[in-house]
Amino acid sequence: MTRHLIVSLMIATLTLCAAACSDENGGDNGDDGNNVANNTVNNAGNNDVNNDDNNDTPDANDDPEDIGEGDGGGMEDITEDEPEPDIVDEPDMMDEPDVIDPNCDQDRDNSLSQACGGNDCDDNDPQRSPLQAERCDDLDNDCNAIVNDGVACSFYAHTGDNLYLLDPFAKTIQEVAEVPNLFDIDTHPDGTLYGITATELYRFDEALARWFLVGNFPQIEGGTGLAIDSFGTAFVTAEDQVYTVDLNNAQTQLVGALGGDFFSSGDCVVNKQDTLFMTSKAFDEPDTLVVIDRATGRGTAIGQIVNPNDREQRFTNVFGLTAGWGKLFGLNSRGELIEIDRATGAGTLVHTFEDVRWFGAASNPER
């Protein structure tokens, strides 16, 4: 009981002292609410300062320049000890490119001539340099000392018995298969080879090296020329008439008569521009190159197939025509390979294949 009384008296004494102190401060500084608020803010500020001094992690709101400053254990300057980055010498994009001496690149194909230590094998022809791709012609386009390497430069041609691959630039032939008495052949844009007799349509299977009959012509009895254009439309010339043929079933449709005195020598051909040509024969005269209207079948003479430098060199029995690599070639019964000018009909002998009698020829699918 006495112990409880003593504790109660001590509590009362402390309460009276606290009230007295509060009254004295209230008279000097205003109401208690403001003092409490100020004390709270000041204490909070002091706590923040103390916390900042003892915390190594910078606050998101701190000024970056203040990080690590002060006498406390603040954050160290992390950039002080970092090595300087290596400076890369960037190329000057404004530098002038090396200029080739015009005397060392007279054809302006950006290749140094061999005389100047370069590899341009013909400094007078921009179509011949190490920068050029090889293509089918009589030249070494890429200057590697090999003509037409890596490119296919052959077309199909046939005699009465055999089918060949003929390279007009290398002037070589390679036997491929036998033929069923065909008069002419041509290649579809998809690469399929077709051939005709006077009354039938055939298809060649390259994998089996065999010919298969597609069907008989219901109207044609004297077909001698076959040409297939870039759309897959097939034309057949027969004597003085022009027909279209369905390659799926050999069904035919008359386009029209050639007119004039034109008579199919034995071949017709379509070039890359889908112009339809044929050769026409006449008694005791050289063959004539004729252009045919694909819509009407009407023929127009271009010119006789003769050598412009030797009018005595006249080409007859031109039974095969092929268009490819920007050229028009003819093949005749004497084994002659002839380059024909599409604008004038003039012919130039390229090569004679001994003991060969050409019947027909097919254009390369790329024409």
Image (cartoon, helix red, strand yellow):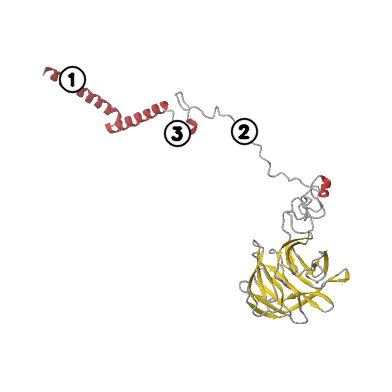
Tell me if residue 3 comes above or below residue 84 in the rendering.
Answer: above
- Seen in the image, is 73 located left or right of residue 97? left
Sequence order check, earlier mark of 3 and 1:
1
Give the Cα separation between the discs numbered 2 and 1: 77 Å
Percent x, y of residue 48: 38, 30
Query: Please, what secondary structure does the residue beneath circle 2 have?
Result: loop
Q: Nearer the viewer, residue 259 or 202?
A: 202
- Seen in the image, is 211 located left or right of residue 23? right
Of the 4 image quadrants, the one containing the N terminus is: top left
Q: Which residue is mark 1?
A: 10
Tell me if residue 209 comes above or below residue 41 in the rendering.
Answer: below
Q: Is residue 293 visible?
A: no
Q: Nearer the viewer, residue 303 or 19?
A: 303
Q: Which residue is mark 3?
A: 62
- Badge 2 amino acid: Asp
Percent x, y of residue 69: 48, 27
Q: Nearer the viewer, residue 173 or 2?
A: 173
Of the 4 image quadrants, the one containing the C terminus is: bottom right
- Seen in the image, is 303 located left or right of residue 88? right
Q: Which residue is mark 2?
A: 86
Tell me if residue 292 comes above or below residue 188 in the rendering.
Answer: below
User: Residue at image x 54%, y 30%?
Assistant: 79
